[in-house]
Image: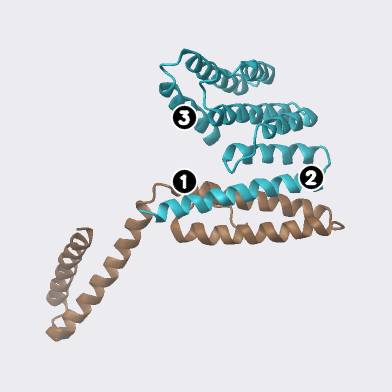
Amino acid sequence: MKRILAVSICLACTGCAAQKAVQTEPAHVPEPAARITLLEKDIQQFEAELEQDLQVAAKPECPRVCELGGNICKLAQKICDIASRNPQHQNLKDRCKDARLRCKTAHQKVSEHCECHDFYGPGS
Amino acid sequence: MHRCLSILLLLALLAPACSRRDGSSRWISQAREANLEADRAIRRGDGESARKALVASLEQPVPDTVNPRDSRMVKQDMCFRLSLVEMEAKQPEKALEWAKKGLSLGRQQDLFTANLYVAMGGAHEALGLEVQAAEAYHQALKINETLLNQTLENEETP
């Protein structure tokens, strides 16, 4: 249903745009087959963008996902701060390395699902 | 803020479930009231009153009709809050005691346990026990990671 709606909107938009182009640039009217190909490409692009927007908007768990991901990286940062204050402890270095890796993995996973505006990522 | 809402939400959810059991209902109500009183006290910078409200609530006997899992979460959250109150009062030893007390109630893969590990890490850090602090933070990090994976798995399962 969403797909049909999206395609209809895109067809309407591109149809109007094409009509305008015909009115303003009569010298470069492409062949009908070429126009259809161009319109199809536009539709595919609009559809992909819309699907992406809908996917991001329809994630009710995103606040929690962002919070958990942020927690992981904040804790990793705390561990690494401690490790840097105590360079003589190999154990702390190892913990820091492990924590950073977990933060990086979390960041990747979270980014695949949600857009977190204040995510405290591995590079922060 | 998020945490306060979560425990109040938990208490609100528990209340109707216990409505037919007077003892449980009373225990849930007093726990909710203690949390709200602590919130008000903390907002006006009165750590002592927050401490009193939370300690008094913790000392209330838990009726048998309350699910042990629920009472653990409620009590652990109070221990976490008490640990924060002590840290605010520059009493890291006491903060550490509350964190340990909370963890002694049970260690699960949930935010209540993770919060207590964070509180423990903070107290250890303030006491100069940095290796122990890093260990506690690492435990908290791993719980958050498990919760993140669970949340993402649930989201992918229709």
Check disc 2: other Cα within 10 Å, few if <14, some if 14-19, many if 20+: some
Q: Residue furthest right?
A: A88
Q: How many marks?
A: 3
Side (left or right) of B151 relative to B51:
left
Give me the chain that's cyan. Answer: B
Q: Secondary structure at mark 1?
A: helix
Secondary structure category for the residue under label 2: helix
> Is the residue marked by circle 3 packed among few (<14), some (14-19), or many (20+) residues within 10 Å?
few
The answer to which quarter of the image holds residue B45 is top right
Whether residue A118 is visible here, answered yes or no, is: no
Picture layout, residue B51 above or below residue A83: above
Residue at which label 1 appears: A63
**Dividing the picture into quarters, in which one does residue A52 lie?**
bottom left
Q: Position of residue B110 (x, y in %)?
A: 57, 41
The amino acid at mark 2 is Gln
Question: Mark 2 or mark 3, which has the lower sequence index?
Answer: 3
Residue B83 lies left or right of residue A27; in this view the side is right
The circle drawn on residue B132 is 2
Query: Looking at the picture, which amino acid does disc 1 mark?
Result: Pro
Residue positioned 62% across, 30% down in the render? B76
Return the x and y of residue A34 as percentages of the image width and height: 18, 85
Answer yes or no: do the residues labelled 2 and 1 have beta carbons within 8 Å?
no
Residue at the disc numbered 3: B9
Q: Chain of mark 2?
A: B
